[in-house]
Image (cartoon, helix red, strand yellow):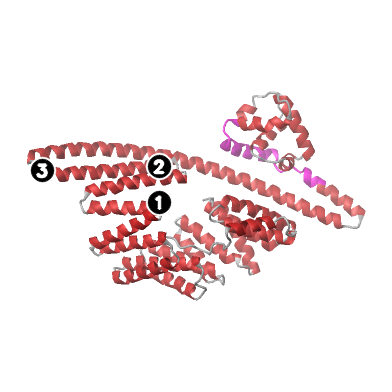
């Protein structure tokens, strides 16, 4: 159970719309800050929108030569890439932010420590995650410090080092009590820390202490009407009562959680409750109820998979595990009835049939498992290739933007010069830079290989056109990658007007009526 790392923006939806409306009237100096504020609002819930507004803010900051604003954008961009699972790109960006922020005494250093810790935590590199969390703890930015304490505690809880987990959870709790506890997000985090402390107490077999922490957590969550968390508190109570052999109390707590989840329409909590109730009844040899709740778990899990757009492989894997569990419960139920109602001869027959069924199920399970492993391996390999190709192409685009920014800055400096002769000389150098090829012939082979990984078969189709020059073919590939006129001009060492004329000639060679049809043609190849 993860703790909310930092307070979510306090803006409501209506306030957000007002912020967007004010973008029309705000001056250039404040526009970047406003765009970044909107991006931070979206971060964590709508990361595509967050990235869009971050890119807009970055453009404004670069135009105004606001270095601090630029690195604020880099920090949020790194966090967004981390949430996408693009960890290599995220780590690369965040290290740059850390390097700049440490030199300039900027709080982005502590925020980036926290984000790097989260990334290494997700990669199961716990020692490295702890190192970055410790750096955040020793910083001065309180939200990052509190979250780092809590997240190190979660790592130790995962590693079953319960004393260490409790130490860090208590430190996080003290940090919250030293701050303003009136904010709902701070109250939620305090309740979650009590919940995690109860887990640590249960791990140490200190059940009475754990139950006291759970009562505190329940009281905190009630104060903000967080019924989802209250249901989870009851689930943890049920786990504690099961550990102490109080099965009636455990069932009572599970049913309270079930009632809350059903009444408040909380499918994620319902899913967890159904799974726990199925296991509880199975352990009590009540196979009828075990089967009932397992079927409910299967139905709600399938529904959630559809909402989350999970892959077919993950869906089939869950279904297979559920069916395997259903078969297991069904067999146990049959065995129970046959033991009580049938003679010894009939029991022997059933055991023989059960053995055959188990062998068949085991063979099917092994077959499905091997098929799933092979499918996942191929999918993983394909995703790795695509991500690597995408990352390398993104690096190319970044270099284009950096060159464009550099040339633009140089042009502005030249325009400020009073000496006409110097202007002419520098303008000639700028024009030379504009015409310099970003991709040499040696580089082309590398990017052609990357392109084939992203769009297999495209190159072989366009190379069937004998009338197309090598430049025509390259331009088709750049258009397929989504480069604009300016980027293609830099790549091919020609002017933007040259790119437009080349597109017109290219359209005629392919047999299109005009250049406007070229994009549709490329999409359909």
The C terminus, quarter of image: top right
Whether 33 is among the magenta residues is: no
Query: Which residue is at the front of the view, 356 or 266?
Result: 266
Toward the bottom, the furthest residue is: 178
**Taking the image as drawn, is residue 139 in sight?**
yes
Q: Residues within 10 Å of mark 3 (few under 14, many from 20)?
A: few
Point out the tag, 2 or 1, that comes first from the N-terminus.
Answer: 1
Residue at the spot of label 1: 267
Residue at 78% x, 55% y is 409
Front: mark 2 or 3: 3
Q: Secondary structure at mark 1?
A: helix
Q: Which residues are magenta?
A: 431-458
Q: Are marks 1 and 3 in contact (CB under 8 Å)?
A: no
Number of residue marks = 3
Q: Which residue is located at x 76 percent, y 35 percent? A: 500
Who is closer to the viewer here, 89 or 285? 285
User: How far separated are the C-alphas under marks 1 and 3?
Assistant: 40 Å
Q: Quadrant of residue 269?
A: bottom left
Classify mark 2: residues with Cα within 10 Å, few (<14), some (14-19) or many (20+).
some
**Is residue 230 toward the left or the right of residue 136 in the image?**
left
Kindly identify which numbered label has been placed on residue 341.
3
Quickly name the residue at label 2.
Answer: 315
Q: Nearer the viewer, mark 2 or mark 1?
A: 1
């Amino acid at each position: 159970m993860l703790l909310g790392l930092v307070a979510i923006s306090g803006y409501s939806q209506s306030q957000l719309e007002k912020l967007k409306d004010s973008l029309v009237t705000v001056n250039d100096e404040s526009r970047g800050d406003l765009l970044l504020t909107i991006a931070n609002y979206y971060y964590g819930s709508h990361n595509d929108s967050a990235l869009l507004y971050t890119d807009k803010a970055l453009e404004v900051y670069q135009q105004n030569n606001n270095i601090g604003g630029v690195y604020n954008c880099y920090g949020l961009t790194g966090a967004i890439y981390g949430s996408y699972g693009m960890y290599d790109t995220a780590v690369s960006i965040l290290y740059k932010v850390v390097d700049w922020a440490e030199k300039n005494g900027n709080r982005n250093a502590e925020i980036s420590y926290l984000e790097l810790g989260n990334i290494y935590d997700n990669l199961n590199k716990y020692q490295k995650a702890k190192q970055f969390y410790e750096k955040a703890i020793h910083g001065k930015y309180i939200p990052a410090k509190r979250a780092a304490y809590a997240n190190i505690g979660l790592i130790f809880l995962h590693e079953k080092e319960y004393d260490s987990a409790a130490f860090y959870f208590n430190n996080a709790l003290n940090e919250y009590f030293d701050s303003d506890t009136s904010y709902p997000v701070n109250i939620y985090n305090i309740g979650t820390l009590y919940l995690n402390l109860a887990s640590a107490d249960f791990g140490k077999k200190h059940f009475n202490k754990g139950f006291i922490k759970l009562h505190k957590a329940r009281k905190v969550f009630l104060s903000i009407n967080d019924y989802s968390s209250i249901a989870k508190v009851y689930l943890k109570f049920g786990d504690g009562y099961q550990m102490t052999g109080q099965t009636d109390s455990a069932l009572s707590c599970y049913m309270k959680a079930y009632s809350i989840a059903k009444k408040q329409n909380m499918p994620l909590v319902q899913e967890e409750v159904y799974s726990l109730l199925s296991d509880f009844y199975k352990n009590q040899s009540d196979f009828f109820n075990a089967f009932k709740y397992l079927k409910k778990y299967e139905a709600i899990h399938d529904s959630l998979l559809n909402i989350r757009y999970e892959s077919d492989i993950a869906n089939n894997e869950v279904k297979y595990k559920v069916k395997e569990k259903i078969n297991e419960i069904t067999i146990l139920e049959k065995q129970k009835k046959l033991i009580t109602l049938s003679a010894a001869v009939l029991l022997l027959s059933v055991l023989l049939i059960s053995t055959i069924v188990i062998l068949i199920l085991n063979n099917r399970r092994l077959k499905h498992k091997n098929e799933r492993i092979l499918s996942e391996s191929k999918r993983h390999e394909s995703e790795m290739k695509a991500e690597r190709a995408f990352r390398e192409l993104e690096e190319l685009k970044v270099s284009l933007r950096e060159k464009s920014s550099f040339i633009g800055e140089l042009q502005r400096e030249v325009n400020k010069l009073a000496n006409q002769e110097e202007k002419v000389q520098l303008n000639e150098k700028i024009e030379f830079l504009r015409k310099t090829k970003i991709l040499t012939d040696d580089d082309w082979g590398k990017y052609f290989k990357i392109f084939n990984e992203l769009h297999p078969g495209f190159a072989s189709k366009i190379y069937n056109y004998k009338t197309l020059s090598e430049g025509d073919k390259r331009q088709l590939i750049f258009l397929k990658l989504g480069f604009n006129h300016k980027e293609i001009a830099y790549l091919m060492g020609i002017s933007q007007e040259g790119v437009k004329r080349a597109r017109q000639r290219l359209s005629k060679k392919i047999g299109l009526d005009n250049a406007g049809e070229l994009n549709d043609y490329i999409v359909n190849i």
